[in-house]
Image: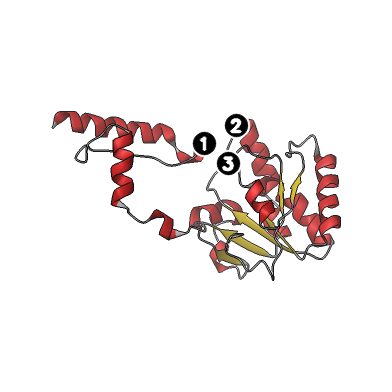
Amino acid sequence: VLRNIDRTRFQIDFVVNRRHENGYETEMEQLGSKIYIIPKFKGVNYFEYIRRFNEVLDEGAYHIVHGHVSSSAVMYLKAAKLRGCVTIVHSHSAGYRGNVLERIIKRFFTAGAKWQADYWFSCSKLAAERLFGRKYATSNKYHYIPNAIVVEEYRFDESIRDRIRSDLGMSSTDVLYGHVGTFSTPKNHKFLIQVFKELYKKQGEK
């Protein structure tokens, strides 16, 4: 979005809990964005978290706050509304990450996020239902926002196919499966491994 938006009309800054090695931060700053780093919300640091976020809001005098971290959105969106900002909460997942206790805590803090938001965004129906409830679609607050992808970069290219197969030591006729995704619970890797196991067995039978 930052790469393609009209940056003469819109200023987009980012609040994150750490800089990522080989991440996007350098490019974001080159495109004119500010990067604010505040502590990750852990429950016990409630007051520090709110204080630091308020400092960001005071410095930037923002018109819109678009929240992608739903587990702490009820807090930072409330702070934004008190300053007259338009607020958005964006749901990207159908579930909660972490162990049982972490999921319970996240569910608790997430519960009120939708009431602090002027607009509800989600990337899927399941993600919307998780955060906004089963009747989300009847709300005039709700908007379906597909993940932003430059599709041209993912079009099939036979030369790339041949190069990757060569790098992997595979011929043009070998069967090759791949997976792209973070190593996190929502990607369901246990099931994915079971699927590949069955595919491997079927290939061995031929």
Of callouts 1 and 3, the N-terminal one:
3
Q: Residue at x 50, y 53 (%)?
A: 126
Q: Which mark is residue 184?
A: 1
130 or 89, nearer to the observer: 89
Which amino acid type is shown beneath numbered disc 2?
Val
Q: How is the image coloured?
A: secondary structure
Mark 1 Cα shell of 10 Å, populated few (<14), some (14-19), many (≥20)? few
Cβ–Cβ under 8 Å for marks 3 and 2: no
Residue pictured at 56% horizontal, 68% vertical? 138
Q: Is residue 206 above or below residue 51?
A: above
Label 2 sits on a secondary structure element that is helix
Is 81 situated above or below 196? below
Identify the residue at horizontal 28%, vertical 38% (top origin): 176
Dot in front, 3 or 2: 3
Circle 3 residue: 96
2 or 1: tag closer to the N-terminus: 2
Foreground residue, 63 or 2?
2
Is residue 30 among the parts visible in the rendering?
yes
Image coords of residue 90 (percent x, y): 62, 56
Q: Position of residue 29 (x, y in %)?
A: 69, 52
Quarter of the rendering occupied by the C terminus: top left
Q: Residues within 10 Å of mark 3 (few under 14, many from 20)?
A: some
Marker disc for residue 100: 2
154 and 110: which is toward the camera: 154
Q: Quadrant of residue 173?
A: top left
- Gap between marks 3 and 2 measured at Cα: 9 Å
| Local SS, label 3 | loop
In the rendered picture of this protein, how many numbered marks are placed on residues?
3
Measure the C-alpha gap from mark 2 to mark 1: 15 Å
